Image (spheres, coloured by chain):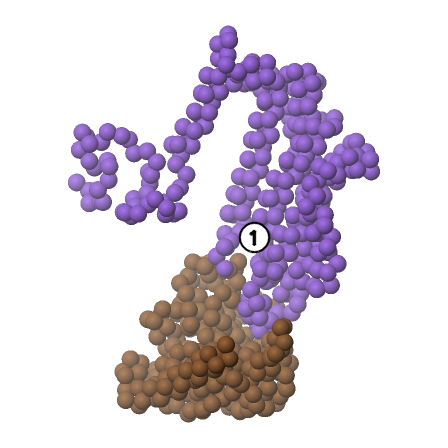
Amino acid sequence: MKESPPSVDALPAGLRKFPRFGRRGTQSRKTVTFGDASEVTTSKVWAVVSLGGLLVLWWYLTRGPEPILDEKTFPSPVVIWDAFVEWWQDGYRRTSAWEHASASLSRVLKGMVIGTVIGIPVGFAMGLSRIMRGIFDPIVELFRPIPPLALLPLFIMWFGIGEESKVNLLVWASVWVMIIAARSGVLGVSGSKVHAAYSLGANKWQILRYVIMPNALPEVFTGVRVALGVSWGTLIAAELIGAEKGLGTTIYIASRFFRMDIVFVNIIIIGVIGASMEMIMRFLEARLIPWRGKG
Amino acid sequence: MKNLSVSNLEMVYELPKGGSVHALSDVSFDLQAGRLLTLLGPSGCGKTTLLNIAAGFLAPTSGTVTLGGEPITGPGQERGMVFQQGALFEWQNVSQNVSFGPRMNRKKKSETAVIVEDLLATVGLRGFGDKAVYELSGGMQQRVALARCLANDPEVILMDEPLGALDALTREKMQGLILKLWQETGKTIILVTHSVEEALFLGDRLFVMAPRPGRIEREYELPFAKVGLSVDPRELKASPEFIEKREELLSMIWDMEEQIMGHEDGTS
């Protein structure tokens, strides 16, 4: 026998009624686990069970000739899968699925890039200078709480119904988040790091480049992540109100023609893209900023 | 080699709600090049303020600090700093931290590489150059901080409780390293500490400072640091001379703390 702490697998077959669900991988010998946050990791088994259960429940509620949910407004997952295949292959209203998705994505990217390029320098200036803080603080505090969508009618009047108004709306949605993230990144630098750098002969420019910028990077990254989420939500809602192409537009048009299957497909794709963006950002963060939270 | 000279230093902090704190009152001393001065005293005695003025991070209310006759008006690389903790750049690896000073001065890469290798060996971190600083223990991080400070070859090294965050055993080892660096490099060092034993063991000169107002209360010339490397440090710290000094200082600081407590009770 191997010398190892006794585990469920080592028990006699008669006692081994249940497979080891959940805590696989933790060889914890702790006696107190309830309330210990470090013991609560995501159980992959239950994640699959939860997702699968949801799908089965949905299928159950929509199955048969007389389903519990009205099939006109709540189609079954099978119908939606077919709609997805159709939409993906042939598109909807002479526009391919990829065109709709990429129209939405490119708006978000344009808005984010411009919002970031404006927001980071302003946030840095606010973190570094009393005067800049005085100038921008009231502007940021006044405009940040306004939900971007409230401005959509104005933006449409100013910039037209086309791309410009949407991209500008996303610039608006992301720029405040980026300003605040950059500012708090700058303010988060510890005095002793700055002092140490000065004592090592760094000048102001070098302090900015080699101390303040890398120190602010984790916060800036969080800002990008948050702004991306806000922009995605704002854009889809803006597209519902009016656009030529886009996932939100497709939802709106499909609902007017009572194609609930297409509506569902788009909602799911919006969710999947949103979650993927978050996951890509987390992956990049782990790669680019391994020192995060370790200062 | 340059001497450090402090004359008639006054530091008064104005409090935002009115009133003021007299952090330093008429502090004067001359420190010859190559000496190791330890500053000891209860909190609020101005020892860190004094260090920060010498570093150039604070401007005194009045009085001057000069190094080699040149008045100190701001931070400069002839005065290196070692902080208690958290002053390493966690986005850089060990080598990059140590080479920070030379890189800021645009030294040749080949020269810098030699300096870094030498210093890592000196502080006992040979082969750790590629490690991330957050992967190191507290003691090793302070070794990096010492090496980083030495990379610019400063005249004076100012240490603000450099071993304050370390466990007792690591602390003893690091005391040995500081003595070694002091004796091998001949640098002038000012070291602030809360530990009576550390102040006695490392200080070739020792100031006991007192609060309200912050001032130098007593001054000692000590023999321990000079022999600290050649004898067993534990034995030295257990010797009658050492214990006698230790108890003397402890009771002095104890009395100061008592006075502060009494003072606070009286005013509140």
Residue B238 locus on image (x, y percent):
28, 83
Q: Quadrant of residue A261?
A: top right
Quadrant holding the N terminus of chain B: bottom right
* Residue A6 visible here: yes
Q: Is residue A73 left or right of residue A149?
A: left
What chain is colored brown?
A: B
A193 is higher (above) or lower (below) than A163? below
Residue B212 locus on image (x, y percent):
52, 84
Q: Residue at image x 43%, y 29%?
A: A50
User: Total marks drawn?
Assistant: 1
Q: Residue at image x 65%, y 34%?
A: A105
**Which of the two residues, B143 or B71, is positioned nearer the viewer here?**
B71
**Which of the two residues, B9 or A215, is positioned nearer the viewer here?**
B9
Q: Quadrant of residue B49?
A: bottom right
Q: Residue at image x 33%, y 39%?
A: A23
Dot 1, crowdedness within 10 Å: few (<14), some or many (≥20)? Answer: many
Q: What element carries label 1?
A: helix
Chain letter, disc 1 residue: A
**Which of the two residues, B252 or A178, is positioned nearer the viewer here?**
B252
**Which of the two residues, B157 or B153, is positioned nearer the viewer here?**
B157
A65 is higher (above) or lower (below) than A104? above
Q: Residue furthest top?
A: A65
* Residue A167 visible here: no
Residue B73 locus on image (x, y percent):
64, 81
A182 is higher (above) or lower (below) than A205? above
Q: In this view, does A22 lie to the left or right of A136?
A: left
Residue B104 locus on image (x, y percent):
60, 68
User: Please, what is the three-letter code of the amino acid marked with disc 1?
Assistant: Pro
Q: Residue at image x 52%, y 62%?
A: B89
* Residue under numbered circle 1: A218
What chain is colored purple?
A: A
